[in-house]
Amino acid sequence: MFSLITSSQEDTMRQKLIVPIMIVAILLYAGISSALEKSQSGTLHISFSTLALGVGYSWGDGTLRLNDGRSFPFSVEGLKLLGLGLSSVNATGSVYNMKRVSDFNGIYKATDPNVTIIKSRSRTTFRNQRNDVIITLESSNKGADLSIGTKGFEIMFR
């Protein structure tokens, strides 16, 4: 079969399509980014220790700071499967989708179970099991920590 479009016309058509596609991609990215910013409820800081021999146990304290400037102290306790080691962790992060302060309390589970082997920095996302509150944490660890499996913790206001 014969083509009615020459290769130079085809190249021109491709070039004309690239710009609109890039504009749509940028607008979508901007929309997603601004939606995420609008749903951020506040920030948090947690300091906790972990002791693991088989099953790991973590305990510590933190502070939730809402976007309006109010702060709320809380305690955190948690378990992890198949752990070994002793470590202290400092974590900071963001809280999303909180409609009221009481939504923050609850049991959080990692959305992405992972393997950590003596890792000094990590980023993990957790979801509250009773509502849609999401926490993203960036942590720095001191000590040795080997863990395999799902991580989770409970947050309780003090």
Image: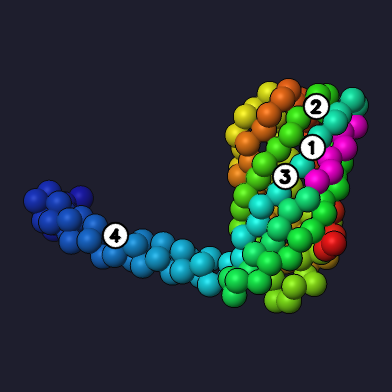
Residue position for label 2: 86
Give left or right: position of 10 versus 85.
left
Asked which quadrant contains residue 53, the reply is top right
Q: Earlier in the sequence, mark 4 or mark 2?
A: 4
- Nearer the observer, 130 or 79: 79
Q: Secondary structure at mark 2?
A: strand
Q: Secondary structure at mark 3?
A: strand
Q: Which residue is mark 1?
A: 49
Mark 4 or 2: in front is 2
Q: Is residue 50 left or right of residue 12?
A: right
> How far across and down, in percent of the image, does residue 98 sit?
69, 71
Q: Which residue is mark 4?
A: 22
Name the quadrant of the C terminus.
Answer: bottom right
The answer, for residue 116, to whether it is visible in the render is yes
Magenta stretch holds residue 33: no
Q: Which residue is pictured at 53% across the width and 66% down the height? A: 36
Badge 2 or badge 1: first in the primary sequence: 1
